[in-house]
Image (spheres, rainbow, N blue to C red):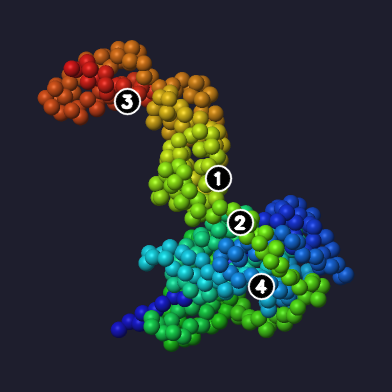
Amino acid sequence: MAKEYETVIGLEVHVELATKTKIFCGCSTAFGGAPNTHTCPVCTGMPGSLPVLNKKVLEYAVAVGLATNCDITRYSKFDRKNYFYPDNPQNYQISQLYLPICRNGHVDIDTAGGKKQIRIHEIHMEEDAGKLIHDEWNDTSLVDYNRSGVPLIEIVSEPDMRSADEVIAYLEKLRMTIQYLGASDCKLNEGSMRADVNLSVREVGSQKLGTRTEMKNINSFKAIQHAIEGERQRQIEELEEGREVIQETRRWDDNKESSRPMRSKEDAQDYRYFPDPDLTPIVISDEFLAKIKSQEPEMQDAKIARYQKEFDLPEYDAQIITSVKKMADFFEDTVALGANPKKVSNWLMGETMRLQKEKGMDQDQIPFSPENLASLIALTEDGSINSSVAKEVFEQVFADDVDPKQYVEEHGLKSMNDEGALRGIVEEKIAANPKAVEDYRGGKKKAIGAIVGQVMKETKGKADPGTVNKLIKEILG
Ligand SMILES: [Zn+2]
């Protein structure tokens, strides 16, 4: 009988914090910029330069720790992780090994089998490295230190996940939580959130963990899913053929849909960590902790409850709208302008998400203003435009953030619901469709649909279908 295998996955997630300046110097963290312009002696590892911790980094790290149910380490330290690499000018990275700032947390995720708790082993603060650009054309490598010293937190989970779906649910939960806190924008495609996947397989029922491999910096949910499925299959084949899984770091190539070894996986002792003598230990006071706690914004669960109570929104809508902080903010801004909450929710969950998906945009990319959505909703509510015209106008709002009122006027899209003006066209179409009239009178009430359709066509979609229906029925008695 074929053996059954279970996948065991733990994640190391790096998140770039949204501070304006770097972790140990005053250089800008802005993305992009001409190479090596956001640099100074500290973040280029010049001898004699001294790092000073950016307090905002500590505040964000503690806020994320509290929101993920961690214990906050009241006395913590930085350590040097020693290794040579050209993007690492100090020859060590300042990180935390012995006393990370947060420990023993967890988040709850929704899975097909219900709620599941994923434990967080620790969260530590560290600095990012620079960036190497390999110019194959000129056979040279260039280095840009703008990213060197950008603050990161690394969130290390326990090996509690069993499938790609659980991994994605966990990452989505982390992303949402951190976005709500404002600690990072968590964009996988820009590298402000990056996941390393530690994966092993074992026979179902076995308690012992198999040998794991690590896949580094996978930058989309889709690639993570592929990498997990591909690596699970590869490890099972190794075991089935009587070989051993080797502990190593592998690079996932999403174009080839396969991974290849990068290097044998190193252990902590390979880095000869030691406490950084240039940085003083961090002591967290009760006041500091109380301040961070008091600053926690309204999180998703509280928002869901409030939207149902305050706006009478169905729970389903509230859940979807609040799953992305920017969308929740947008929703509240539009409602504050006087728009009907359920209508705002419908436009966001319907056409907005449809167009975002169609254009490959993230859910937090809303390319139009609350004012223009509120104005579009007002036009539908006062009968100025019908629902099919509204959809057409919305596409323009989405594309260019046009003012719907002005657009409707300029393009003559105002609804024709003036009975006097419509009556003539309706009479004409009734006369032209004797068969439909006969069917209608014979009891087939749906037969007038053909006449409504022709009136709509004649008026280029501007007639109000309700008025047209009413007129036809009136004329036909
Ligand atoms: Zn600097």
Q: CA distance from mark 2 to mark 1?
A: 16 Å
Per the rendering, the mark at residue 329 is 1
Neighbour class for label 2 at 10 Å: few (<14), some, many (≥20)? some
Q: Residue furthest left?
A: 442
Which of the two discs, 2 and 4, labels the residue nearer the N terminus? 4
Residue labelled with disc 2: 296
382 up-or-down from 124: above or below: above
Graded by Cα atoms within 10 Å as few (under 14), some (14 to 19) or many (20 or more), the crowding at tag 1 reads some
Ranked by sequence position, the earlier of labels 1 and 3 is 1
Q: Which quadrant of the view contains residue 82?
A: bottom right
The residue at label 4 has a CB less than 8 Å from ligand 1: no
Q: CA distance from mark 2 to mark 3?
A: 49 Å
Instruction: Report the Cα–Cα distance between label 1 and label 3.
Output: 35 Å
At label 3, the amino acid type is Pro
Across and down, in percent, residue 216 comes to: 58, 69
Q: Which residue is mark 3?
A: 465
For the residue labelled by badge 4, is the local secondary structure a helix, a strand or a loop? loop
Reading the image, the residue beneath label 4 is 73
Of marks 2 and 3, the one in the foreground: 2
User: At 46% from the left edge and 64% from the top edge, which residue is drawn?
Assistant: 109
On the image, the x and y values in percent for residue 351 come to 44, 40
Whether label 1 lies within 8 Å of ligand 1 gets the answer: no
Question: Compared with residue 446, is residue 79 higher up or lower down, i.e. above or below?
Answer: below
Secondary structure category for the residue under label 2: loop
Could you tell me if residue 234 is visible in this image? no
Q: Earlier in the sequence, mark 3 or mark 4?
A: 4
Residue depth check, mark 3 versus mark 4: number of the one nearer the observer: 4
Of marks 2 and 3, which one's residue comes earlier in the chain?
2
Looking at marks 2 and 1 on the same chain, the residue that comes earlier in the sequence is marked by: 2
Residue shown at 56%/47% (left/top)?
A: 326
Say which amino acid is labelled 2.
Answer: Glu
| Ligand 1 closer than 8 Å to label 3 CB | no
